[in-house]
């Protein structure tokens, strides 16, 4: 067994794709419109779906915003350098909500950014050694 994907509902598909592709550097892997259900699914990620977990962005055509609720946490992405990753996000117009630095009560370097719909993305700096 393995994790295939995580689904996020997005209010504006073009805005969400701009963030995940142009700010975070993912690739659009596949897209399908479902006119009968009035929604579109777009899968994005860093690797092929056959070997890597990806994100499914679901755009319900008649819904512009969602209440994120209190149960959702974040999606984590491993990065080589969390400090540099935050600078790149800012340079590309993204929003950093927690600058890179050691996590509270630990040594792992983390940072948080936010997508246009308010979903949190955690950067976890790759451990060396």
Image (cartoon, grey):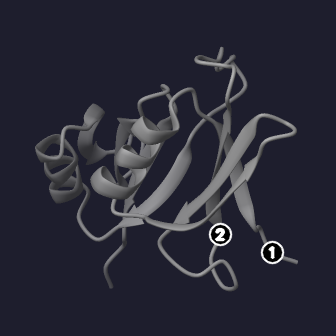
Dot 1 alpha-carbon crowd within 10 angstroms: few under 14, some 14 to 19, many 20 or more: few
Task: Say if mark 2 contacts mark 1, CB within 8 Å.
Answer: yes
Residue at x 67% of width, y 29% of height: 61
Residue where numbered disc 1 is placed: 2
Residue 53 tag number: 2
Under tag 1, what secondary structure?
loop
Under tag 2, what secondary structure?
loop
Compute the Cα span from label 2 to label 1: 8 Å
Residue 40 location, quadrant: top right
Residue at x 44% of width, y 48% of height: 17
Specify whether residue 104 is in view.
Answer: no
| 98 left or right of 8 in image | left
Nearer the observer, 61 or 58 = 61
Residue at x 85% of width, y 37% of height: 37
Q: Position of residue 102 (x, y in %)?
A: 30, 47
| 5 left or right of 45 in image | right
Dot 2 alpha-carbon crowd within 10 angstroms: few under 14, some 14 to 19, many 20 or more: some
The N terminus sits in image quarter:
bottom right
Compared to residue 115, the image places residue 123 above or below, namely: below
Q: Position of residue 110 (x, y in %)?
A: 35, 49
Compared to residue 55, the image places residue 94 above or below, namely: above
């Amino acid at each position: 067994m393995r994790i295939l994907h995580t689904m996020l509902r997005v209010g504006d598909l073009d805005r969400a794709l701009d963030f995940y592709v142009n700010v975070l550097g993912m690739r659009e892997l596949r897209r399908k419109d479902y006119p009968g259900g009035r929604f579109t699914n777009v899968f994005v990620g860093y690797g092929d779906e056959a070997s890597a977990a990806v994100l499914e962005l679901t755009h319900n055509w008649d819904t512009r915003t969602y209440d994120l609720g209190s149960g959702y946490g974040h999606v984590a992405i491993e990065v080589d350098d969390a400090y540099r990753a935050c600078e790149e996000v800012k340079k590309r117009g993204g929003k950093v909500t927690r600058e890179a630095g050691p996590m509270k009560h630990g040594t792992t370097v983390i940072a948080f950014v936010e997508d246009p719909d308010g979903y949190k993305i955690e950067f976890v700096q790759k451990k060396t050694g």
